[in-house]
Amino acid sequence: MEGTKKAEPEAAQRVLLISPKTSFGPKLQRTYAGGLGTVNPGERNLLPPLDLLRIAGVLRAAGSVPHIVDEEVDGVLPPAAYTREGRAEADIVICQVSLAAMHEDIRKLAEFAAAGLRTFAYTSIRRHDQWQEILTTSGCAGLLLPEAIPDLGRLVGAGATGDSRNPGLITAETAGDLARLPQIYGDLAGEPLPARDLVDHRHYVFPALPGHRVTTMNASFGCPYPCSFYCPYPLGEGKKVRAYPVERIAAEFEQCAQLGITAVVFRDPVFTFDRRRTLSLCEAIKRTGTGIRWWCETRIDRLDEELIRVMVDAGCAGVEVGVESGDAGMHDSAVRKRLSLDTVRAFHHTAHQTGLKMLFLLLFGLPGETRRSIANTLEFILELGLSSEEFNVGVITPYPGTPLHDLALSKGWIRGDQDQFTSFNVVMRTDELTENELAEALALTEELHRIDGGRAPADTLAGYRHRVLNWAGTKPSPGGHRA
């Protein structure tokens, strides 16, 4: 059924949804970082444009005819390709705009606007100055924020304006209104299923779920935790956790099975936030009998052995968990996850016992980070024996709109251009670490990946530890890891 086309209603509004190709290539993951996007040079993921699939589902239910172009898969076509005999084949164009690719995405928007097509930007960006730059430079009619999705059937109409009735639509007249950071979301229960039939899932890959046709899914949105100081997920999705009904997720699994999709990557910031709901959700997924394997992201302190076993039984192949640091002092002072390293160790043990794959998400460069604390994190990876597929280290990024960004601006820490805000480029310093020191720390991480982390031969690990200690200028702290 993949790629099945439905008859178009006569005189229906035609909407072209575009995920633009950029110089980052498939390394740009637009749904990550709360929708702002990350660019991970070490990843081989290529995931479908989930937000556009959601938008297409809403528009189709409202009587419009959506068409999705993922330029990373479908190739780049100029605006002229969407006209025939001088007549536009789309009444409206909606183009994704991500933070790191903002200027490239703006150029794509401008091409369609210049061709006379009514064009909107879809974005999770939350800065008024950036809204104004997008609108002014591209010439688009407006910006659509994630909270606009439930009402898009109405908003894309010819009379749509950026007034108070449409909190998710930003226009040139409202972009400077400092009160317009609404995060007023519609009811998820009534949202139609994403239009997954509009893309060919055979093109998408997620290495942790090899050999599958992969799609992405959200069971919930939002994150209420204090790591919002530096984490962009609350910025893009709000601090209140909003969840789809369990029955809706089961229906999405059944839809996936009908389309030949065999793997799902959940994009929830905290998939297991509500333990009781997670148990019900796993039961509902299992009852579908689809056999679809799935992956999710959550917090270690929202997991326990019983829950993990239920998840694995329902098809969960693995989880990403934010750990941030392997240094006890950083967890006490800067990480804001309220985790102890012993809790991390216990989870690691349970995951191995239950057959759950894991990916530890670590972060270098929070205020207060030192060479010594970074060395302790690298040693913690070695202590746990993590393979190169089991850890991922990013570098602190001052996402515009977070308190960290305001602090970094006030202290003059930011050095990199916004186009380098990828989560894996060094774009700022702190009072404790220079840009060069953070770059050196990332190089040590890359070396750890090359030797396959804690699974390298003993002599290789000994040489690596020696280089880390020389760089740190000290032995790892006794509180940072077990001897």
Image (spheres, rainbow, N blue to C red):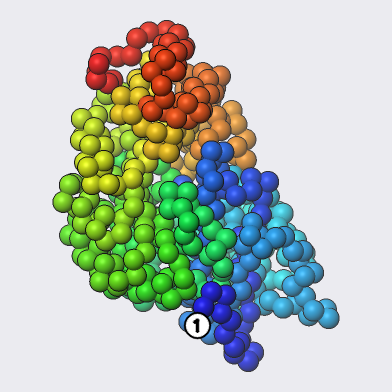
Mark 1 lies on residue: 62
Identify which residue is drawn at 38% across, 18% down.
Answer: 458
Q: Is residue 460 shown above or below 320?
A: above
Looking at the image, residue 248 sits to the left or right of residue 450; the answer is left
Can residue 387 be spotted in the picture?
A: yes
At horizontal 77% and vertical 64% (from top left) the residue drawn is 78
Q: Residue furthest bottom?
A: 10
Question: Horizontal and vertical percent for residue 164?
Answer: 47, 68
In terms of secondary structure, where does tag 1 sit? loop
> Quadrant of the image for the C terminus?
top left
User: How far across and down, in percent of the image, does residue 332 sit?
Assistant: 26, 26
Q: Is residue 425 above or below residue 460?
A: below
Q: Is residue 120 left or right of residue 127?
A: right
How far across and down, in percent of the image, does residue 19 sit? Answer: 61, 60
Q: Residue flagged by tag 1: what amino acid is it? A: Ala
Q: Residue at x 43, y 11 (%)?
A: 466
Name the residue rendered at 34%, 43% in the picture. Answer: 358
Crowding near the residue tagged with mark 1, few <14, some 14–19, many ≥20 C-alpha atoms within 10 Å: some
Q: Choose top left, top right, bottom left or bottom right for residue 185.
A: bottom left
Q: Nearer the viewer, residue 250 or 178?
A: 250
Q: How many marks?
A: 1
Task: Give left or right: position of 136 versus 312.
Answer: right
